[in-house]
Image: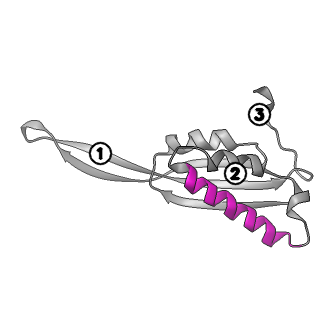
Amino acid sequence: MKAVARLRNVPTSPRKMRLLADMIRGRRVNDALNILKFDKKHNSIALEKLLLSAISNWENKHQDADLETADLVISDILVDSGRILKRLRPAPQGRAHRIRKRSNHVTLVVNSLSTGDVETENDNN
């Protein structure tokens, strides 16, 4: 009983997005929403919307199941590199430096805890 949501061409570097993805990987959906809501990073807004979309996808897929009793967990979250916009910035003595504006793709999988074996690495904290 899993649902997938994808976010493509987010205009931030994948490295910055992976910091947030690592914070919520393996957590329950309610905990992850609280983490993303009160985090200061700009990427948390996009990830929060993506998580809400994944929850909505799960509800549409499993209309007979109840959301509160399902005990949803973020089973998998992947951050891949997207397209890179290459720009030039003027440099001294007639040269130019290349500026790479990176983007990323995020794939978030929400799974019900009762059906899937989800490894939580948060027990180590």
Is 77 a magenta residue?
no
Q: Which tag, 3 or 2, sits closer to the chain's start?
A: 2
Residue at screen point 36% across, 49% down: 101
Query: Of label 1 and label 3, which has the lower sequence position?
Result: 1
Q: Is residue 104 above or below residue 91?
A: below
Amino acid at the residue labelled 2: Leu
Q: Position of residue 64 (x, y in %)?
A: 91, 72
Residue ID for mark 2: 33
Q: Is residue 107 left or right of residue 11?
A: right
Magenta segment, principal secondary structure?
A: helix
Please tell me whether mark 1 sits on a helix, a strand or a loop. strand
Q: Nearer the viewer, mark 1 or mark 3?
A: 3
Residue at image position (90%, 65%) is 66
Query: Could one spot residue 74 in this view of the protein?
Result: no
Q: Answer left or right for 67 relative to 7.
A: right
Quick one: label 2, few (<14), some, or many (20+) residues within 10 Å? some
Q: Nearer the viewer, mark 3 or mark 2?
A: 2
Using a 10 Å C-alpha cutoff, classify the residue at mark 3 as few (fewer than 14 neighbours), some (14 to 19) or many (20 or more). few
Q: Are marks 3 and 2 in contact (CB under 8 Å)?
A: no
Q: How far across and how far down the image is residue 89, in percent?
A: 20, 46
Residues at circles 1 and 3 in contact by the CB criterion of under 8 Å:
no
Per the rendering, the mark at residue 122 is 3
- Give the amino acid at mark 1: Ile
The circle on residue 99 is 1
